[in-house]
Image (cartoon, rainbow, N blue to C red):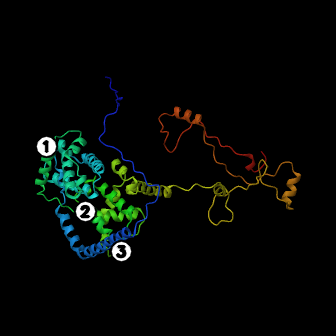
Amino acid sequence: MAYQQHPSSSFQPCDTYFVEQYEPEYPAPRLGPKEHAKVIARERQFAIADELSKQASDEYQDDILAHMLVMDSATLPDVDSIDIQTEIQWFMRPYLLDFLIEAHTAFQLLPATLFLTVNLLDRYCSKRVVYKKHYQLVGCAALLIAAKYGDRKDRVPTIKELKTMCCSQYDDDMFVQMEWHVLQTLSWAIGHPTVDGFLQMAVVDTPYDPEVEHLSLYILEISLFHRDFVSKQSSDLARASLALARCVLNRPQPRNSDWSSHYDSLTLVNLSQHLVQPSLVLSRKYSSGRYSRVSRLLEQFLAHQTSIPKAYNSPPTPSPDSSAEQLKPYNGEIGLATPQKPQNQSTMPNGYLTPPITPDNEAFVIASHASIPKPISGVIHASPTPPSSAQFLQGYHQRPDENPYCQHQHFSQQPAVVYHGVFLNGQV
């Protein structure tokens, strides 16, 4: 008996699948009176709960903020202790953070989970010597602890998933052992007020602005890559990043009475200096519409700021009319100026222009009848003509004992003195 064989596919089986959702083409049916009353009652309960929550937060907000500041100082890593690590160097940090950001995005974890992961990683490296081959394992253990501590339970990554992301470089038991070792090293003190918690407290009394919040988170995640902000308090980073985001987006700054207005100017300047060339993984993450495409907005802002000095430093291009006017002679200006020739030049070969009226003088009358002009009376001594180079060399070779550079030089011949006849008293 022959069985029909189905053609086998050349593609490998995939555990994931896609679910297509179709929007209804027709509007939803109208609710009945009872269902409509239930919806209104539910919305009213939500409004009452929000009001009670706001009243409670206003009453305990100062105490909560004071406790967060105390915990922030108590759970800071020591950057000097990380500097003395034997195998781990600071240039390895961006590679590990790119891996953690991709894993954090793949599991769709909360923003606080990423900041808590980096805090646990840095605190562990401040107290234990970490080998280079275990650096990624410590990061995965910190991500697992942070996800279990503050994220949704259905999104906590499993050890199998972490092992797959590490390309099976570590065994399952190594993840469990490293997780236990991190908790023992930190004395089970996991709670750390992250920067996004301080950021939410800073914008709680302001209208919702997604671009400002997303750009602040983008700046805060950029700060994770740099050593200068490892031991910086989360409260200072949150306020400085919020002020910088408002400056980039041209948003108004808060009042001086608000807690978010008391930011550190030095921290803000340091953050602004590290915005150029961020991580490609991080820039790609914040270029999506989910984060308001703030990475592109920041790139446009930095490009505009770079073009401003070039526009001011470049000299203006002179117009053809202005360059022609500069070549014109001075007309009626006061001061020293180079004399200019008149535009209408005379065609005479030499000499001066004949005056329009010849003066009626005896000297001119006599000169007009004479064929040769009358010479000027008196003798004017002419300057002696210097000898030629040939005469000088001939005299120099005849008297070698004399110094040619002395004051009285001897020549073989007397220098010729030429007298022009026009200057003699008499005819030539």
Q: Earlier in the sequence, mark 2 or mark 3?
A: 2
Write the residue at 20% across / 39% down. Answer: 169
Q: Position of residue 75 (x, y in %)?
A: 17, 61
> How many angstroms separate mark 2 from mark 1 (CA)?
34 Å
Helix, strand or loop at label 2? It is: helix
User: Dot 3: what SS?
Assistant: loop
Mark 2 is on which residue type? Ser
Horizontally, residue 292 falls left or right of residue 96, namely right
Q: Which mark is residue 184?
A: none
Alpha carbon distance from label 1 to label 3:
53 Å
Viewer-proximal residue among 374 and 91: 91
Residue 111's quadrant in the figure? bottom left
Residue at image point 36% right, 51% down: 283
Mark number for residue 234? Answer: 2
Q: Is residue 45 left or right of residue 379?
A: left
| Mark 2 Cα-neighbour bin, 10 Å: few <14, some 14–19, many ≥20 | many
Q: Quadrant of the C terminus?
A: top right
Provide the residue designation for mark 3: 255
Q: Of the residues under marks 2 and 1, which one precedes in the sequence? A: 1
Q: Amino acid at mark 1?
A: Asp
The circle on residue 173 is: 1
In contact (CB < 8 Å): disc 2 and disc 1: no
Task: Tell which circle, 1 or 3, labels the residue nearer the N-terminal end.
Answer: 1
Tell which tag, 1 or 3, sits nearer the viewer: 1
